[in-house]
């Protein structure tokens, strides 16, 4: 099927930052594919966004779901201009109550290895699996872009600074999964540089979402801003970077 409008797929787009990214891209004229693990939630989100949004069932930990989503995008739209990998989790269970409580429960000495595997399955391996499945579609579109939603907490340079107030919050669960995501981003950028496909990681900042029990200080609009900015850039877009809307480049 031929589709004239630019198409963007946002994973984990039924709530929080992902939903706001989808809304913003729809506002800029994109056809937005609302990736959601549960189709009904994606459908509700797409209806709230408007007629240019379409739900896509996509569980980034399920190879069959990923393959079906890629086939659907190909069949229904025939192109993919932007892939925004936003889907992520901090825990498979109930959030322990506060950012401080979460940090205590996920220190290297006590973190559950099964929990770590589950979080990394979504935040790291899921990102790579979706990348591999969607890359043939992205390669059809000159100037395609990939934006991986990371976190400033994944910066080893920042977290190794003794003056950082929240340095003790760095853990092998969520924060280190974002460090690994940053490494994947660089690997993707290097692989695709000669093809002109731009790949970048962004930090949304400390955004108020269900993921952090709404302890964040920034709005979802602020959290979505940098991913949207990079998605809207054309051939002049940078590649292989890690940035924040306000603070600019973040060190790896």
Image: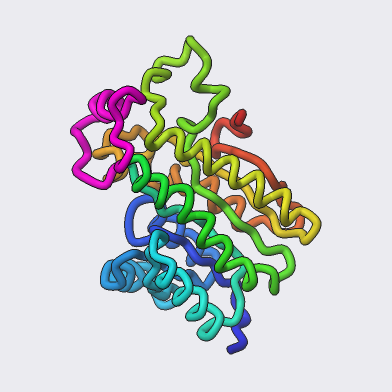
Count of numbered marks: 0
Check the image and report above or below for 50 versus 18. below
Q: Position of residue 99 (x, y in %)?
A: 28, 29
Q: Main secondary structure of the magenta part?
A: loop
What colouring does the structure picture have? Answer: rainbow
Quarter holding the C terminus is top right
Q: Is residue 103 part of the magenta span, yes or no?
A: yes
Instruction: Work out which residue is located at the far top of the displayed protein and give it.
Output: 163
The residue range painted magenta reads 91-115
Q: Position of residue 212 (x, y in %)?
A: 29, 38
Name the residue nearer the viewer: 77 or 168: 168
Name the residue nearer the viewer: 217 or 142: 142
Image side of residue 26 versus residue 44, left or right: right
Image side of residue 158 versus residue 44, left or right: right
Q: Residue at x 48, y 80 (%)?
A: 72
Q: Is residue 32 visible?
A: yes
Check the image and report above or below for 197 versus 72. above
Image side of residue 210 versus residue 122, left or right: left
Q: Position of residue 223 (x, y in %)?
A: 44, 43
Q: Residue at x 60, y 83 (%)?
A: 3
Q: Residue at x 49, y 22 (%)?
A: 159
Quarter holding the N terminus is bottom right
Q: Residue at x 36, y 25 (%)?
A: 108
Check the image and report above or below for 35 versus 89. below
| Location of residue 100 by image quarter | top left
Q: Is residue 101 part of the magenta span, yes or no?
A: yes
Instruction: Work out which residue is located at the far bottom of the displayed protein and give it.
Output: 1
Q: Position of residue 184 (x, y in %)?
A: 59, 46
């Amino acid at each position: 099927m031929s589709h004239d409008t630019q198409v963007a797929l946002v994973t984990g787009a039924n709530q929080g930052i992902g939903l706001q990214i989808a809304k913003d891209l729809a506002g800029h004229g994109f056809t937005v594919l609302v990736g959601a693990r549960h189709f009904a939630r994606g459908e509700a989100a797409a209806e709230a966004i408007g007629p240019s949004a379409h739900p896509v069932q996509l569980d980034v930990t399920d190879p069959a779901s990923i393959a079906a989503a890629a086939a659907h995008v190909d069949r229904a739209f025939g192109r993919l201009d932007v892939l925004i990998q936003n889907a992520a989790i901090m825990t498979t269970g109930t959030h322990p109550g506060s950012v401080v409580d979460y940090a205590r429960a996920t220190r290297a000495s006590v973190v559950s290895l099964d929990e770590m595997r589950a979080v990394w399955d979504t935040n790291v391996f899921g990102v790579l699996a979706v990348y591999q499945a969607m890359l043939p579609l992205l390669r059809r579109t000159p100037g395609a872009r990939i934006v991986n939603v990371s976190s400033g907490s994944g910066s080893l340079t920042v977290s190794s600074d003794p003056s950082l107030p929240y340095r003790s919050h760095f853990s092998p669960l969520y924060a280190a999964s974002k460090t690994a995501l940053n490494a994947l981003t660089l690997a993707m950028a290097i692989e695709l540089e000669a093809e002109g496909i731009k790949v970048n990681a962004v930090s949304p900042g400390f955004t108020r979402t269900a993921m952090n029990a709404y302890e964040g200080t920034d709005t979802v609009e602020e959290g979505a801003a940098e991913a949207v900015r990079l998605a809207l850039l054309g051939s002049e877009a940078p590649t292989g970077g890690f940035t924040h809307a306000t603070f600019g480049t973040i060190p790896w």
